[in-house]
Image (cartoon, grey):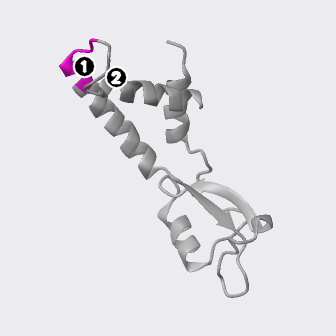
Amino acid sequence: MTAPTRALQFARDLAEPDWSLSVPVPAKRSIAKLLAAVDATLALHKEDAIYECDDNGFPQTEDESKFVRNICGTCSDSSVTENLDDGNYDISGEYGEVGWPCPTVEAINKALEAEQ
């Protein structure tokens, strides 16, 4: 289990009503709200895999050797994701493309890994 995963699980445990530690109810509510915010942010920032396309413009996802890289579809310009959907993506990269992990996910992971 990675450090961010451990930190999130510990926070989830603290927010549980039957947790053995005496965590005040307002603190549990705050922890639950913070977890919801982190979860919602991470749900938005998912990695999109880029694969080479065949002659018809369809990604060759079944062939791992055709994998190019991962990007964040949320942080990348909409033109990048539109080109992906249309099969017009330039596999050498496009302007406005944000690699994976994106700065948002990196910031969350860095904060959760930090020694307190």
- Mark 2 and 1 residues: CB-CB less than 8 Å, in contact? yes
Q: Residue at x 24, y 19 (%)?
A: 27
Q: Look at the picture and state if 63 lies above or below 33.
A: below
Element assignment for label 1:
helix
For this view, does 44 lie left or right of residue 99? left
Per the rendering, the mark at residue 27 is 1
- Residue 14 placed where, x, y %? 34, 22
Q: Position of residue 25 (x, y in %)?
A: 19, 20
Question: Of the residues shown, which amino acid type is indicated by label 1?
Answer: Ala
Q: Which residue is mark 2?
A: 14
Separation of residues labelled 2 and 1 (CA atoms): 9 Å
| Residue range corresponding to the magenta coloring | 22-28
Check disc 2: other Cα within 10 Å, few if <14, some if 14-19, many if 20+: many
- Label ID, residue 86: none
Residue type for callout 2: Leu
Q: Residue at x 58, y 71 (%)?
A: 84
66 or 13, which lies in front?
A: 13
The mark nearer the N terminus, 2 or 1, is 2
Report the residue at 53% width, 30% height from top: 4
- Asked whether 95 falls inside the magenta stretch, the response is no
Is residue 78 rendered to the left or right of residue 22? right
* Element at label 2: helix
**Which of the 4 image quadrants contains residue 94?**
bottom right
